[in-house]
Amino acid sequence: MTDNHRPDDPEHTPAASSVEEVYSVEKQIDLSQKSYSQGQLVRRRFFRHRGAMVSLFVLVFITVMAFTSIGYGLIPSWWDKTFYDAGAAVDGGRPTMQLWPFQIGEHPFGQDTIGKDYFALTMRGTQRSLIVAFTVGLLSTVIGTLIGAIAGFFRGWVEAILMRVTDLFIIIPLLVLAAVVGKMASGIWWLALMLSLLTWTGLARLVRGEVLSLREREFVTAAEAIGTGPWRIIFKHILPNTIGTIIVSATLAIAATILLESALSFLGYGVRAPDTSLGLLISTYQNAFLTRPWLFWWPGLMILGIALSVNFLGDGLRDAFDPRQNRTAD
Amino acid sequence: MTTTTQSGSGQPVYTGSGTPTGDEEVVLAFTEVDVRFKTEFGSVHAVKGVDLRVRPGEVVALVGESGSGKSVTSMTAMRLLPRNATIGGQVDVAGREVGRLSESNMRRLRGNDVAMVFQEPMTALNPVLTIGTQMVESMELHGVSRGAAAWKRAIELLGMVGIPEPERQMRKYPHELSGGQRQRVVIAIAISCDPKVIIADEPTTALDVTVQADILDLLRSLKDKLNTGILLITHNMGVVADMADRVAVMFKGEIVERGTVEEVLLHPNHEYTKMLLGSVPRMGHGRGQMDIRVKEEIDADAPLAIELKNLVIEYQRLGKAPFRAVDDVSFDVHQGEIVGLVGESGSGKSTIGRCALGLIPAAAGEFRLLGENITGMKRGDLKPLRKRIGVIFQDPAASLNPRLPIGECIAEPLVVHQVGDRKSREKRVYDLLDAVHLPREVYNRYPHEVSGGQRQRISVARALTLDPELLVADEPTSALDVSVQARVLKIFAELQEQFGFACLFISHDLAVIDLLAHKVVVLQNGKVVEAGPREQIMENPTQEYTQRLIAAAPVPDPLEQGRRRRDRHELLREQGEEVVELNVDADQFHQASREAEVVEVDGTDDQPRR
C-alpha cells in the first residue's frame, strides 16, 4: 500500500481538489444525475414486480371488458345482447366459445335456463361487483385513515372513544350486520355505502399503530417545536409516511369486499333481481351446477380473477413500499 | 512488538499487520478479502482486497468512518454476511480456513475460536431470556459445560468481568441491568468458550464515557491475562489510542495505512489519516482547534435568553410516583452565549432541552424563555415564542421528514408562521443553503439522497430559517463521522458568529463543548453538579464527578492517553473507586476451559461453501 495512494473510485470527480473532498465519506451530490423522489422509487419497484404487472393487466382487461361490452351509463356497448332479454336456446344453452379453432359464436358463455345471454349477465354482475368493491375500498380507507390518525395522534380520551367505537364495530359479526343493513338498503350505491361503514375498522387500527410510532419520531417533534399545528402535522408530516400501509390495506380491502359482496348476494341480502351480481348469479344457478356447470363457472372465475389480481397488486405495492424486504437478485 | 523493519535501502518499511514475519502464531488472518453486495441498483464493492493479521494477545484496531467496510471485513470471519454478498479471498481463524468449513463446523468455530462483542448490548442480548439462561446456553451449545456445572461457571465468569453479586444477576433480564453491565455480560459470554480471538465491533460506542473507560480497561486486562487476540473495530481515535497495539486505517473498502499505534497516530503518512486525526477535537486543547473560532467576548449585561430557577421536571408513571428527571436546576443563558449542557445518559440534559422547546411541561420552578415564563403556558401562547427559537436534533436521518423535499423542509417554519410569500420564502431557502455550504440544486431533492452530515446541515439551515434568538442543539454532531462532525461544527461556529444567537448546546462529548461553549453546566441524575465558565470547569474542576468525567474522555494520542489513563486510575483510587480488570488467573481459566471441552472439533473439511 503506497503512501500517496488515491482511491480510484468512480464516485470521485476528478475536479475534487482538497484533501477533505477527496477523502470525504459523504457522497458528492451528483447534480447531473436525475433526482428520484420516494414516490418515483416506489413506482419503479412496482413496475418491475412481475406478478403485480400481470395482475394489473388482468384487472384492467376485466374492467374494460365489463364496462364496454354491455355498456354503462354513457359508455356505449359493443355486445349485441342484453342481460335481461331472453332468446332462443342455442345448443341447449351450452357455451359457444371455443379455443381451437378459435370462435366466439352466438353465446360465448352460454345461456341461462330461460335463454338469457350468459356473457351479458356475467358482465353485468362483474360491473356491479367492481363498483361495490372500489367504492367500498375508497370510502372505508378514507374513514379508517381519518379515525386511526386522529386516535393515534391526539391520544387521551379522543383515542379512548374512537377505539372503543372501533371495537364495537369489530365485535359485531360483519355478515349479520351487513345482512340487516342490506335488507334495509336498496340499490347498489347504498349497499356500497353501508359496507364501507362496516369495514373501516381494520385499517383504523393499522393506521393508529403507525401513527403512534411516527408521532414519537424526531421529525414530528421537530415540527411541533417549530410551532406546527396538529392538523398540519397529521396531514403533512405523518400521513404521507403511512401511505404504504394505507394503499396496501386498501387493495386488500377491495379483494375482501368482492368476496363479501358475493357472499351477501349469494345469501340474498346484497344485490337483488332483476339486477344481478356475481354472487347472485352463483346463488341463483347453484341447483343447475350438475346440468349446466358453466352457469357456476363463469361468475366463479370472474370472482377468482378479480380477487386474485387485486391481492397480487397489493403484494406488489407492499414490496414496492418496503424495500427492506430484500428480494435477492434473480 | 514492533513491526518496523529495515529495507535494503535503509528506509523504514512499515510492513505492519499485513505481513506476519516468520512463523509467528496468527489467530485471525484476512488474505486478499474482497466483498461485493448485489443490490437493486447494481453491485457494491464494499471491501477491496484487505490483508490483516491478528496475533494472540494483541489488539489490532480497524479504524474507519461509516461505509469504509470495516464491519463487513470482520463479519467475513464469522461468516455472518447476508446472502447477497460475494466473498473473495481467504479468512483463517485459528489456522482454519473459514470459507471451507461446513455449516456445522462453522457453528462450532463461532464462540469456540472466535467470539463477538457488539456495539449495542441491549440488542445483542435476548430481552425475553435471563442473563443466566443466555450464558448457560452459549456454553452448552459449544459443549464447554452443562447443567449445574455451566450455571456455576457462568457465575464465575460474571464475577470475573466485575459484576457485583453474580448469583443474583443471573436471574435478571437484560433490561434490569445498566448499559455497562450489559456490555460486561456480553464480554462474559464472549470469553465463556475461551476463544482465541474476539472481534469487538464498536464495543463502547453506545456507552457513556466513564463506562467506556471501564469497559476498555476490562478488555485490556482480558487480552493481557488470557492472551486473546482482539480485532477492535471503531471510529473513535481516542479508543484506538487507548487500546490498540497496531492500527489499520480503512477508507472505502481499502486499507490506506497501517502500522503500530504510535506510527499511525503520531506520524501519519497518508493524507486521509492526517485529515481524520485533524478532525478530532482533543480534550484539554481548548479553543482554536480545526480552525473553529468562537466570539469570546460576551456582553455580561445582555438580556437573558434562558433563565432557570429551581426547575423540576417530572415524568408521570402509571401507578407509581412520578419520576423526577430534572431536580432543582438553576442556570441562565445570555443572548449571544453558548452554554454547554454536559452529562451522561439519564442526567436530564435532553429533558431540559425539550422543556425549552415547550414539548414537556415543568412540574415546579420557573423557566423563563426570552423573558417570558413558560411554565404552565398554553399551547396557543407558546406559538409566537416558538418563532424565536430554533432546534437541531441528534439524528439527522430521523429529524427530517423523508417525504418532504429539502427546500420545503427548510421553508416549513416560514409556512407555519405565515411569513412572506412563495417568492421570498424561496429566496430565504437559497440564502440558507448558501450559508451551510450546500448547492442550491438540492432544493428539490429528498433527504435520503444526501448523506448524514449534509442532512445535519439541512437541519441547521431549518433551525435558522426564522433568524432565531435562541438555538437548542441536542447532541447535534453525535451521530456523525468525525470528519463530517468537524465540518458541521465549523459551519455552526461561523453561523453563530454571524447571527449571534444564544445557544443551549447539549452534548456528552466534552471535547466538543470545550471547543464551542462559553459556559458549562455539568448534570448528573437531574441535578447540577458544577457550573461555571468553560476554563474553570474544563481546567480546574472541583467536583469529583466532573473530574472523573474529564479523566475518562480518551484523546487520540497513545502517549498522552497512556498518561491520562494512569492519572485516571490514580484519581479513581483516590476517590475510593475500583479500577476495572478481569479477576482471573490465566492458567486456571484455560485449564478449566480445556477440561470442559468435551466435543472434539475436527479440522477443515473439504465441503465447498454454499
Image: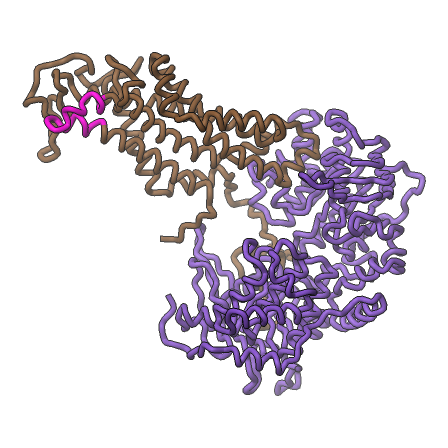
Quadrant of residue A302 within the rendered picture? top left
Could you say where residue B95 lies in the image, as x and y percent from the top left?
49, 79
- Which range of residues does the magenta coloring cover? A281-299
Could you say where residue A219 lies in the image, as x and y percent from the top left?
63, 39
Tell me, yes or no, if residue B259 can be seen here.
Answer: no
Task: Verify whether residue B5 appears in magenta.
Answer: no
Residue occupying the point 37% across, 43% down: A48
Quadrant of residue B323 within the rendered picture? top right
Could you say where residue B487 lies in the image, as x and y percent from the top left?
70, 52
Q: Look at the magenta stretch and give its main secondary structure.
A: helix
Count of numbered circles in the view:
0
State the quadrant of the N terminus of chain A: bottom right
A313 versus A186 height, above or below: below
B465 versus B561 height, above or below: above
Q: Residue furthest left?
A: A91
Tell me, yes or no, if residue A267 can be seen here.
Answer: yes
Q: Is residue B204 left or right of residue A84?
A: right
Quadrant of residue A291 within the rendered picture? top left
Question: Any idea which chain is the brown one in this picture?
Answer: A
Residue occupying the point 72% across, 59% down: B279
Q: Nearer the viewer, residue B160 or B40?
A: B160
Residue occupying the point 55% across, 83% down: B25
Question: Any idea which chain is the purple one in this picture?
Answer: B
Task: Verify whether residue A292 appears in magenta.
Answer: yes
Colour convention of the picture? by chain
Q: Residue furthest front?
A: B148
Q: Nearer the viewer, residue B279 or A163?
A: A163
A119 versus A36 height, above or below: above
Q: Is residue B299 left or right of residue B609?
A: right
Q: Nearer the viewer, residue B106 or B281?
A: B106
Could you say where residue A44 lies in the image, as x and y percent from the top left?
42, 41
